[in-house]
Amino acid sequence: MKQYLELVQDVLDNGLQKEDRTGVGTLSVFGTQKKYDLREGFPLVTTKKVKFDNILHELLWFLSGETHIRYLVQNKVNIWNEWAYQIYLEENDLLEKYPRYSEEWKAHMKEFVQQIADDESFAQQWGDLGPVYGKQWRAWGGADGKTYDQIQYCLDQLKNNPTSRRILVNGWNVAELQELIHHEHHAPPPCHTLFQFNVMGDRLDLQLYQRSADVALGVPYNIASYSLLLTMFAQEVGLTPGIFVHTIGDCHIYSNHVEGMREQLTRTPHMLPELLVAKKPFWELSHEDFELKNYEHDAFIRFPIAV
């Protein structure tokens, strides 16, 4: 994963200091691109431990079309909890009572997450994040009032019209995202703005345009998640998983991540692991059908999340 370390070095060397929505501050460059050839191994970062299980559960959650966090919580995936919790605090006028990241906030969020796991009706009411990835991928709201399954569209096109240059999924539905765009406490509008499949001979490639990318926490997940999606699509249509092209708009390292990023640059990448996927139809694949083999990695690096 030298490409990832090159990206880290680029941002540290060339990034400009910028204020941002979170108030943490970043080093930022605009317009980067890295390519990962899945024929060389599965591109999961090895210079720190990355929780592949979290990535797999999150992708399956996206593909299910769900927008509430109960499935994730029940599978110990906590990466979306803070967004749902902040919505809950705002809707119940509790933002002042539980200041963000205070000890009271942390303790109360644990109670909130546990209730999401235990109480289905509470989860349905307070665990929903709005029109995030699952909604846009599987039930895009059109101007005609209909919804459109973009994932199924791509599968159908790859099977029936593989030379098309229109096999893409758009996550940025302007009409549905206004509340997310303009609301401080809601989940952010999709960072993974658009992705496109392309058949090149006997291989399938995938390019993602990502409007905003957190290099320390988000990018390792993004690389692995879309490489996993590419693998699933390729198997379904009988092609070899090829190249994942990761194009990023605002590519940034948060100021409180710089030290950990510099530590990661001192480490030497390991051999890439191998991903095995059960030979089953696309929509029948579940968590148990994926196996990551020979994942060698360095120690975990803890980075605080900026919400």
Image: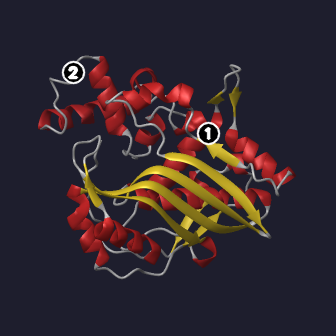
Residue at point 75% right, 56% down?
236
Q: Nearer the viewer, residue 215 or 56?
A: 215
Residue at point 38% right, 28% down?
182
Residue 242 seen:
yes
- Which residue of the protein is positioned furthest toward the top in this rendering? 92
In the picture shown, does residue 237 fall above or below 167?
below
Q: How many marks?
A: 2
Q: Decide if residue 129 is on the left or right side of residue 81.
A: right
Q: Name the residue under label 2.
A: 94
Q: Decide if residue 112 is on the left or right side of residue 142.
A: left
Q: Quadrant of the C terminus?
A: top left
Q: Earlier in the sequence, mark 2 or mark 1?
A: 2
Q: Nearer the viewer, residue 151 or 295?
A: 151
Q: Position of residue 299 (x, y in %)?
A: 30, 71
Residue at point 67% right, 22% down?
143
Q: Position of residue 108 (x, y in %)?
A: 21, 31
Q: Which mark is residue 274?
A: none
Badge 2 amino acid: Leu
- Label 2 Cα neighbours within 10 Å, binned few <14 / some 14-19 / many ≥20: some
Q: Name the residue under label 1.
A: 137
In the picture shown, does residue 92 fall above or below 300?
above
Residue at point 78% right, 58% down?
237
Image quadrant in which you'd find residue 106:
top left
Determine whether the residue tagged by mark 1 lies in a helix, strand or loop.
helix
Colouring used for the render = secondary structure
Q: Position of residue 213 (x, y in %)?
A: 41, 53
Determine whether the residue tagged by mark 2 lies in a helix, strand or loop.
loop
Q: Where is residue 24 in the image (x, y as percent from the top left)?
A: 22, 47
